[in-house]
Amino acid sequence: MSDKNLDNPAGGPPEVLTRAIEKLLRPLVGLLLEHGLTYTWLTGVLKRIYVDVAEKEFTLHGKRQTDSRITLLTGVHRKDVRQFRAEPLSEAPPPESVYLGAQLVALWTSDERFLDEQDKPLGLWRLPRDDGEPSFEDLVTSVSKDIRPRAVLDEWVRLGVAEIDESGKVHLKQQAFIPSQGFDEKAFYLGRNVHDHLAAARHNVQGHSPPYIERSVYYDDLTADSVSKLSELAEQEGMQALKKINRRARRLQNRDKDKVNACHRMNFGIYFFDAEDTTDQSED
């Protein structure tokens, strides 16, 4: 990335960009305060990330990145730059429950062995049966033979991902691995999904081509009842899109996984949000 991206003939960052950044930071700051993470903590994290991004993304072609240049780019003191470069950031692996859970839900919602005639996830017997009906144990062992299916089931019931009916069948409560309980799992998806959404938006704002899909439908002047109806519609239609992408992605992954150039990842998601509009409408 060249330095021309840092130039601004007006002598400062575009106001429309600074306002956008202020807006997107508000829910993040609210989350930090809810969990006792102060401004002092955040500045320490930001300094390290500024250094890491500057070192990896803002190099000059054919030149070695130096502490002085990183200080110039970021405003972080050279002493801190030197320390952070000596102790580079490393990405933490996802919680094991997330990695395994996402694989199992993807399989349960895409493999015909575990789907009914309407392509909906079957209710699964907990243990294999003589009649050949698929079981939850079959599902788990299809992904990993090192994990006890009963342990997975107990954890999924606790997280609200699955439930067991009166007949003993296991049912998937939601067709994406988004636990209703489980803070670690929710925090992981917060980091991954919001990171990827912001990365796509950054790509598009910078004018790179082709742009990523980053679209939404926005309406105001709605009643709470109307928003509820739209939320239900978004859930139904959004899940159809996710299931279709999931099935195609699994087929392509099975085709590509042994290829030497199979080094890419993708993320496709949906979201829905509503809030009471506090804008002073008397100015309209």
Image (cartoon, helix red, strand yellow):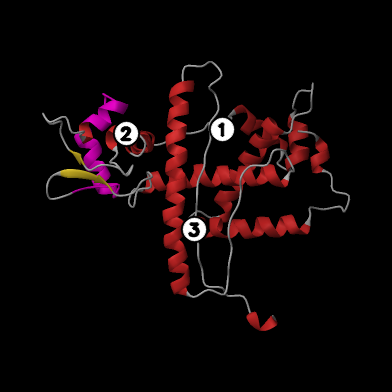
Q: Secondary structure at mark 3?
A: loop
Q: Using the image, determine if residue 65 lies above or below residue 166.
A: above
Query: Residue 4's quadrant in the figure?
Result: top right
Say what amino acid the circle numbered 2 marks.
Glu
Task: Indicate which disc residue 272 carries.
Answer: 3
Q: Position of residue 158 (x, y in %)?
A: 25, 48
Check residue 140 for magenta coloring: yes
Q: Secondary structure at mark 2?
A: helix
Tag count in the figure? 3
Q: Mark 2 or mark 3, which has the lower sequence index?
A: 2
Which SS does the magenta portion mostly show?
Answer: helix
Q: Secondary structure at mark 1?
A: loop
Q: Nearer the viewer, mark 1 or mark 2?
A: 2
Q: Outermost residue, front direction?
A: 117
Q: Mark 1 or mark 2, which has the lower sequence index?
A: 1
Q: Outermost residue, bottom direction?
A: 282
Query: Magenta part of the protein: which range?
Result: 138-164
Q: Position of residue 139 (x, y in %)?
A: 26, 32
Q: Residue at point 70% right, 60% down?
A: 19
Question: Who is closer to the viewer here, 122 or 180?
Answer: 122
Q: Residue at point 68% right, 57% down?
A: 20
How busy is the neighbourhood of tag 1: few (under 14 within 10 Å), some, or many (20 plus)? few
Say what amino acid the circle numbered 1 marks.
Leu
Q: Nearer the viewer, mark 2 or mark 3?
A: 2
Say what amino acid the circle numbered 3 marks.
Phe
Point out the image quarter for the C terminus: bottom right
Q: Mark 3 or mark 1, which has the lower sequence index?
A: 1
Residue named by callout 2: 112
